[in-house]
Amino acid sequence: MTKKKLCPLCNRRLPNRICPVRGEEICSKCCGLNRASDGCDENCDYYRPVTVRKEVNEALPVYKVLKSKSEGSYAIVVSRERTNGKLQYITLLIDVWKMGLKDCFGSHSITKQDFQRKIIKMWGNLSIFAEISLAEALWTVKYGLRIAKEVKTRIPREFEEYGYILGDMADVKVEGSLYKCFKCGKGEISDDEVELIKEITRHDVAAGVCGTMAETMVYFVCDECRKNKTADKHR
Ligand SMILES: [Zn+2]
Ligand SMILES: [Zn+2]
Ligand SMILES: [Zn+2]
């Protein structure tokens, strides 16, 4: 029985990766350790994903900013055009009625075609979205972050990875009640109502029913929306 050839670099492990620079097989550990310094380039299947670098620049032109036309839970998509002609995008799922920012994903570099394909695959249809301004998207994200922090929703790791695509949010101000009017999304609701929502959220999260049919349904509106509703009735 012939002895299997060992990795020429470490002479310890079995080689399992063809290295185009060396023209021979090396082990995955050595590949990881020597990559780049070896002169690896785009021809290497293992090195190429690493070269897809973030382009952190909030001056990159905004491509599309989308918000789902849903109630209570929104999907927000912010995309920018990179200098290489591709897009970078971040998608955030924000539950403004309970958990706040709860999920996030994105890409540092994707073609416009693949971006569209991905969105359609995810939601079936682009028409569930409306185009909004970047300012409104950022406000909603900050609103969602503020809720998440308060009710201790774990901020997804992906937010750290793709959050740069949003740009600087230091100037985005979200003030007043933690939760806003369920109808208009902007008006204030009372402290008692906020406390009640927090309690319900804690309960629903512990029971694992948030976002399911079994979750507790409440609905609070601001004074303005309440007034309009009464006015409607008297018409
Ligand atoms: Zn090795
Ligand atoms: Zn390589
Ligand atoms: Zn309102």
Image: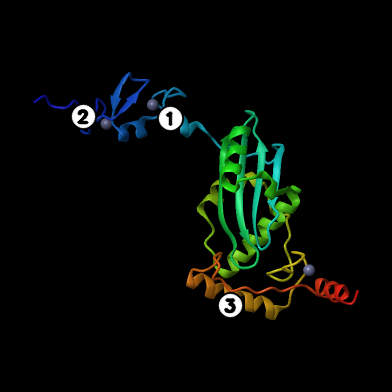
Q: Residue furthest bottom?
A: 192
Horizontal and vertical percent position of residue 96? 65, 64
Residue at x 28% of width, y 31% of height: 27
Residue 32 is labelled as: none
Mark 1 lies within 8 Å of ligand 2 (Cβ measured)? yes
Residue at mark 3: 199
Name, please, the residue furthest toward the right. Answer: 235
**According to the image, label 1 marks what residue?**
47
Alpha carbon of mark 1 to alpha carbon of mark 3: how far?
48 Å
Q: Amino acid at mark 3?
A: Glu
Q: Within 10 angstroms of label 3, few (less than 14), some, or many (20 or more) residues? A: some
Say whether residue 235 is left or right of residue 137: right
- Seen in the image, is 104 located left or right of residue 222? left
Q: Secondary structure at mark 1?
A: loop
SS for dot 3: helix
Q: Position of residue 98 (x, y in %)?
A: 61, 68
Mark 2 and mark 3: Cα distance apart in space: 60 Å
Which quarter of the figure is the C terminus placed in?
bottom right
State the residue at coordinates (75%, 67%). Answer: 183
Q: Secondary structure at mark 2?
A: loop
The three-letter amino acid code for the residue at tag 1 is Tyr
